Image (cartoon, rainbow, N blue to C red):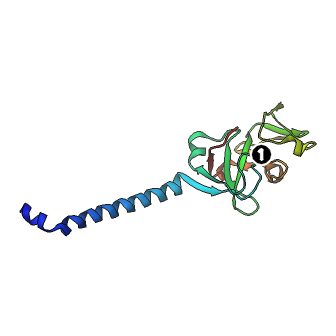
Amino acid sequence: MSAARTDRPGARALPRRRGKAVAVVLAVLLALSCRLWILEPVAVESDSMEPTVGAGSLVFVFKPGPELSGVHSGDLVVFPSPADGTPVIKRVVAVGGQQIEVQDAVLYVDSSPVNEPFVDLATIDGTYYPRTEVPAGTVFVMGDNRERSIDSRDYGPVPLESIDGLVLGPRP
């Protein structure tokens, strides 16, 4: 019987091809499930997060991040723009229950100045934002390029349930 198998090389090749096809299909399904539920690439279209993340960059969003580790000050998050629903990347500067304000371009959280070496204070000198308490269940977000960013100063705090995920990579 073993002689019959070696005489027919195509008989062995067919199961190997099926095995490779199954492996390819499984790899594609795994990649799609990762993209749908775990990691998603997002193209950055604006310069509101420069110098941390420049326009034209590609970032990866860890989608289960908010549920697994929560959302904290300093996190870069992705959520749908309140204006048009496109993905937006911003930095969380305060969470529910904290108070924020901007005095002469310096961000204060709970009356303490925040060290933000990535923000060019010279471009926003003289900028003010009144003391505001961030409601529970929301976060206050701002772009690192404060002069050009449309953020919570314009559209208010972002509900936690609106956050699609945490950006992997750059942090202060």
- Looking at the rendering, which quadrant does residue 109 occupy? top right
- x and y percentages locating residue 132 in the rendered image: 84, 41
Residue at the extreme right: 126
Q: Is residue 77 above or below residue 131?
A: below
Q: Residues within 10 Å of mark 1 (few under 14, many from 20)?
A: many
Q: Nearer the viewer, residue 5 or 154?
A: 5
Which residue is the site of mark 1?
A: 144
Q: Is residue 60 above or below residue 111?
A: below
Residue 44 appears anywhere in the view: yes
Q: Taking 15 as reference, is 37 left or right?
A: right
Residue 129 appears anywhere in the view: no
- x and y percentages locating residue 41 in the rendered image: 59, 56
- Looking at the rendering, which quadrant does residue 108 occupy? top right
Q: Nearer the viewer, residue 15 or 69?
A: 15
Please report the residue visible at 76 percent of the width from the left and 61 percent of the height from the top: 83
| Secondary structure found at label 1 | loop
Which of the image's four quarters has the C terminus?
top right
Q: Is residue 90 above or below residue 81?
A: above
Q: Taking 52 as reference, is 133 left or right?
A: right
Q: Nearer the viewer, residue 21 or 140?
A: 21
Q: Taking 8 as reference, is 65 left or right?
A: right
Three-letter code for the amino acid on which mark 1 is drawn: Asp
- x and y percentages locating residue 62 in the rendered image: 58, 48
- Looking at the rendering, which quadrant does residue 81 occupy? bottom right
